[in-house]
Image (cartoon, helix red, strand yellow):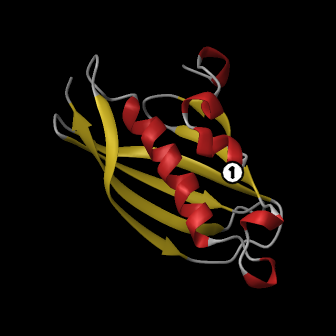
Amino acid sequence: MTTVTDRPDLGSLIPLAATLGIELESSTPDEVHATMPWKAELCTTMGVLHGGALMAFADTLGAVCASQHLPEGALTTTIESKTNFLRAVTEGTVHGVSKPVHAGRRTIVVQTELRNDAGKLVALVTQTQAVIQP
């Protein structure tokens, strides 16, 4: 099992992850776990965490998950993303889990669940990542 201690700092690989406060907890080819704190500067009106921040969190987790299914020397980029927002986040921490749905030669499909501190589903994100050969 690969854990955060086995990987470089996520913020050094993806600077936006540092801005969002994303903390990678564990990462294996089957599952990626991370958290993102609610921050006032990431909110819309009435202290609601912006949907774009949630999408960026899920996209980051999906990229980490997809990268573990790449052939040597290949890169990945998101080519499609679908988000269902199910409830607002107004405090606490968002907990994310990404899992591969399909890992093919040209595309990788990842599904990410985002949950609040109470374990309730905040958003469900399905994304397609392109496999870019060297």
Residue 4 lies in what quarter of the image? Answer: top right
Determine the image quadrant of residue 34.
top right
On screen, residue 119 above or below 130? below
Residue at image position (67%, 52%) is 95
Residue 47 vs 3, above or below: the answer is: below
> Which class describes the residues within 10 Å of circle 1: few (<14), some (14-19), or many (20+)?
many
At 65% across and 61% down in the image, what residue appears?
115
Where does residue 25 sit, x and y in percent of width and height?
67, 34
Q: How many discs mark residues in the rendered view?
A: 1
Identify the element where label 1 is drawn: helix
In the rendered image of this protein, does residue 6 appear above or below residue 57? above
In this rendering, position of residue 129 left or right of residue 27: left
Q: Quadrant of the N terminus?
A: top right
Above or below: residue 34 compared with residue 3:
below
Residue 55: in sight, yes or no? Answer: yes
Residue at 59% x, 19% y is 7
Left or right position of 121 against 134: right
The quarter of the rendered structure image containing the C terminus is top left
Q: Position of residue 58 (x, y in %)?
A: 52, 54
Q: Is residue 126 left or right of residue 13?
A: left
User: Which of the 4 quarters of the picture holds residue 92?
Assistant: bottom right
Q: Check disc 1 and report the residue beneath it.
A: 20
The location of residue 13, given as percent across then percent down, is 55, 30
| Rendered residue at 58%/53% (across/down) | 57
At which x and y percent is residue 64? Answer: 47, 36
Q: In this rendered view, identify the residue nearer to me: 46 or 100.
A: 46
* Residue positioned most to the left: 105
Q: Can residue 98 be seen in this snapshot?
A: no
| Type of amino acid at the residue the image marks with label 1 | Leu
